[in-house]
Image (cartoon, grey):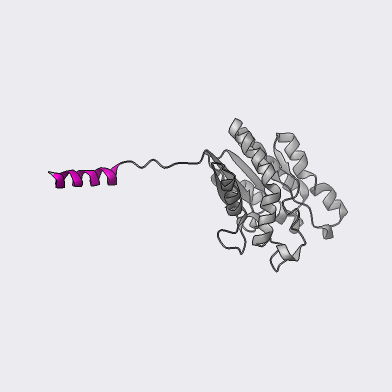
Amino acid sequence: MRRLYVILSFLVFCFSPIIANSAELKLVVLGDSLSAGYQLAPEEGFPEQLQKALDERGYSVEVVNAGVSGDTSSGGLSRLDWSVGTDADAVIVELGANDALRGIQPEITRNNLNEITKRLRERGVEVLLAGMLAPRNLGPEYAEVFDPIYSELAKLHGALLYPFFLEGVALNPDLNLSDGIHPNADGVGVIVQNILPKVEELLAKAQSS
């Protein structure tokens, strides 16, 4: 009889539904190589370091890496629906750097980012636009049109704005890979610490909505 009880207990344990604790919020980072973790170890990328920082502060949030190296704003728009699922509560949009590096017309970048932000906001998703600055070798005229894109779209759609994703990291050889463009693990750490207050504001908006 005791043996039968042990067997039954084992079967109940093995085949009972397992209820996993899930995070209260899902935050997707829709970006390019700057946030995808280009040439970094799996735990060193922006989403992963941001996840750790939020965990340490007691947030119940899952940070999803939806970054694709080499992606432009056009690429981000084309994959928006499958990169950002219907269960997303908030999105950090980090796109546009490759547009500027390739000298793509700023109006194209604006239209793409506008459509991305518009669609997300229509879905009730809170958005943080991570801004980018045009390389100065493209000339002042290009920068004058490109640089304001993020602030103007944030205002238009009621999104949050972090003016420059690489703030405190750009042009610092100690915080970038040998290419001088992509942040190394330490550089990502600086980005996370700098952007964290805005991310916390984003999560607060997502929680309240």
Q: Among all residues in the image, which is located at the extreme bottom?
A: 178
Seen at 71% across and 35% down, the residue is 157
Of 62 and 13, nearer the camera is: 13
Q: Among all residues in the image, which is located at the extreme top?
A: 209
Q: Position of residue 13 (x, y in %)?
A: 28, 44
Of 172 and 141, nearer the camera is: 172
Quadrant in which the C terminus is drawn: top right
- The reply to whether the magenta stretch includes residue 11 is yes
Q: Among all residues in the image, which is located at the extreme left?
A: 1
Q: Position of residue 64 (x, y in %)?
A: 55, 48
Seen at 36% across and 42% down, the residue is 18
Q: Which residues are magenta?
A: 2-16
Horizontal placement of 148 versus 82: left or right?
A: right
Q: Residue 19, relative to residue 52: is it above or below?
A: above
Q: Residue 118, relative to residue 164: is it above or below?
A: above
Seen at 69% across and 55% down, the residue is 190
| Magenta portion: prevailing SS class | helix
Q: Residue 85, relative to residue 140: is it above or below?
A: above
Counting the numbered discs, the total is: 0
Q: Residue 171, relative to residue 164: is it above or below?
A: below
**Residue 102 visible in the snapshot:** no
Quadrant in which the N terminus is drawn: top left
**Residue 205 visible in the snapshot:** yes
Examine the image and state in which quarter residue 99 appears.
bottom right
Q: Position of residue 75 (x, y in %)?
A: 63, 51
Of 84 and 49, nearer the camera is: 49
Seen at 77% across and 51% down, the residue is 105
Q: Among all residues in the image, which is located at the extreme front?
A: 2
Q: Position of residue 186 (x, y in %)?
A: 67, 60
